[in-house]
Amino acid sequence: MCQNCNTKKPYYITTAIAYTSGKPHIGNTYEIVLADSIARYKREQGYDVRFQTGTDEHGQKIELKAEAAGVTPKEFVDGVAGEIRRIWDLMNTSYDKFIRTTDADHEKQVQKIFKKLYDKGDIYKGYYEGLYCTPCESFFTESQLVDGKCPDCGREVQPAKEEAYFFKMSKYADRLIAYINEHPEFIQPVSRKNEMMNNFLLPGLQDLCVSRTSFSWGIPVDFDPKHVTYVWLDALTNYITGLGYDCDGNHGELYNKFWPADLHLIGKDIIRFHTIYWPIFLMALDIPLPKQVFGHPWLLQGDGKMSKSKGNVLYADTLVDFFGVDAVRYFVLHEMPFDNDGVISWELMVERMNSDLANILGNLVNRTISMSNKYFDGEVRDGGVADAVDEDLKAVVLESVKKADAKMNDLRVADAITEIFNIFRRCNKYIDETMPWALAKDEAKKDRLATVLYNLVDAITIGASLLESFMPETSAKILAQLHAEKRTLDQMNTFGLYPSGSKVTDKPEILFARMDIKEVLEKVEAMHAAEAAEAGAEAPVEEAEDVIDIEAKPEIEYEDFAKLQFQVGEIIACEAVKKSKKLLCSQVKIGSQVKQIVSGIKAHYSPEEMVGKKVMVVVNLKPAKLAGVLSEGMLLCAEDAEGNLSLMVPEKKMPAGAEIC
């Protein structure tokens, strides 16, 4: 807050807007929970927080999905946007604005921005011309092809030409380089900054396509309506249109108050668009740049044990059904390092549920309340009989508060949660050190026993108050059972504020129940079996036209086929190829060896979806480089008439390395 007044300092935080092509999985949901924890904590620090999220709703992929579903694109995105918002709300996120890029006010401003940049000379009309790959929707030059085929997917390309508008990125490149060098905090973590500078800015920027004519589901360019605004100029501007930005200068009150943004929180896979395209757009519009862009790591799936069904994707609502909202919030926040990918699996969830939540936290609260009721009828009072161990408890608690605050200022959320749980761990150790059950046997030590329980209740109150930003429901439940008011950050820095003589609840609630991993996995198997059965039951009602014919290739001899070696592989790691929009690079375990395989399937699978899959692999394909990355095999896929891909997976459980014959 302002030191000389009561005015709160504004703080504007945004997430990337979710693409409305389908239901968000837990990796997508992680971002909104992460942003929510930061927003809640900033409110605790006294900021006037504006927290915006939303949905990105235009593009050819959505147009095709809507057509396949037999609905209009708007009907399609309405349904998906509603599902995304439902999950955001389920996870108890405290956003202030949910923007949709189909909102009329957003679309109007995008059109005005496009026209302003065109009139300024930053946008010009030209042509995409070259060799076109239809499935990848991409143009390539002859030199970019690999063996005369698409470098991303390996398919045939055809000469093609498409009229489009382009933005002059290079005009602002030097200015952006200077800005990044002068503002080292702009791109975080530092590894992301180095990647942007070395891989994109310093080698030189190419002009960016900002319109398309090959599909119609987008915001029309009002002065040339056969064009629609293409992706990033539409999607990125939500951060200002959601505040009431007006291209004519008649900005709303929120824009004047909250821009520039304090933090754009995004996934590391879209860091380039937010740290190169977006700031250059803003420079062209003479708008201040956001203060910081944080590219968080990915939440990857585990080793595949969580599901045998095709897809192997985890969703937030499924996890909530098993563990509850706050347990899922705790897991995704605590398991994500600052700049490395995290891993989620059913086994890890159960382990954290039992060790951290049920044992360290839940058991501590239950024991403390139960002892208070057993020995003092629920009354908590400071008996005034101190011991050296008390001072160590207090020191650890107060130091943990300071450390957690420092970690949150650096966006190290997982580390901040660790500091909070250090409070609860120290409380459990304090119980072992003081042995209240032994003190209770000696009437002369009753005041000492009272002091011990008072110190425990006060420490738990501080920890529970600090926990509110991350596990709001759990925090409220603990404080309610202690009949304690939530402390402010300033109050958390003082020990002994719990009103002596207050009473705790006479019926402590079990916050988190221990779970049996075998029972959980059995339920998961049953759930996926039911899903598979339901999918199988629905299959016959699909329209008969769900078949396609392809051009036949020349017949081959068995000896030709026998030259190919097919095996089952297990994908143990996967990441996007930096220099390609379409390629994924997978590490595939085949027997005792691991092969690196590059596939043009990024439009159909995210890296986190790939990990844990059992797939069919051509093992003895001659190694080749795709976009400069060595590929040592090929993943087998099926493709429908619209270019949608599905990895071929074994029907039954098979070990990695099993021969396909």
Image (cartoon, rainbow, N blue to C red):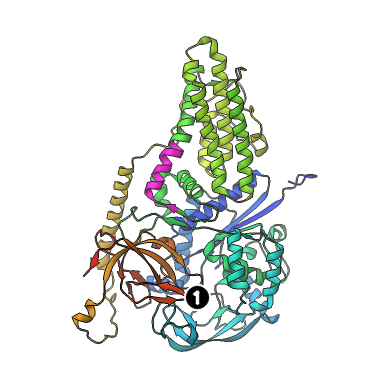
492, above or below 630, in the image: above
Left/right placement of residue 472 relative to residue 527 reads right
Q: Residue 324 appears at what percent x and percent y?
A: 43, 44
Q: Which residue is mark 1?
A: 217
Q: Residue 599 appears at what percent x and percent y?
A: 40, 72
Q: Secondary structure at mark 1?
A: loop
Is residue 105 visible to us here? no
Is residue 579 visible to us here? yes
Q: Residue 562 appears at what percent x and percent y?
A: 22, 77
Of the 4 image quadrants, the one containing the C terminus is bottom left
Considering the whole magenta stretch, tell me its main secondary structure: helix
Left/right placement of residue 128 relative to residue 315 reads right
62, above or below 342, in the image: below
Say which residue appears at 63% left-offset and 27% top-offset.
496
Q: Is residue 352 magenta?
A: yes
Q: Give the extent of the magenta segment.
A: 343-358
Q: Amino acid at mark 1?
A: Trp
Say which residue appears at 28% left-offset and 70% top-offset.
542
Residue at the outermost top position? 444
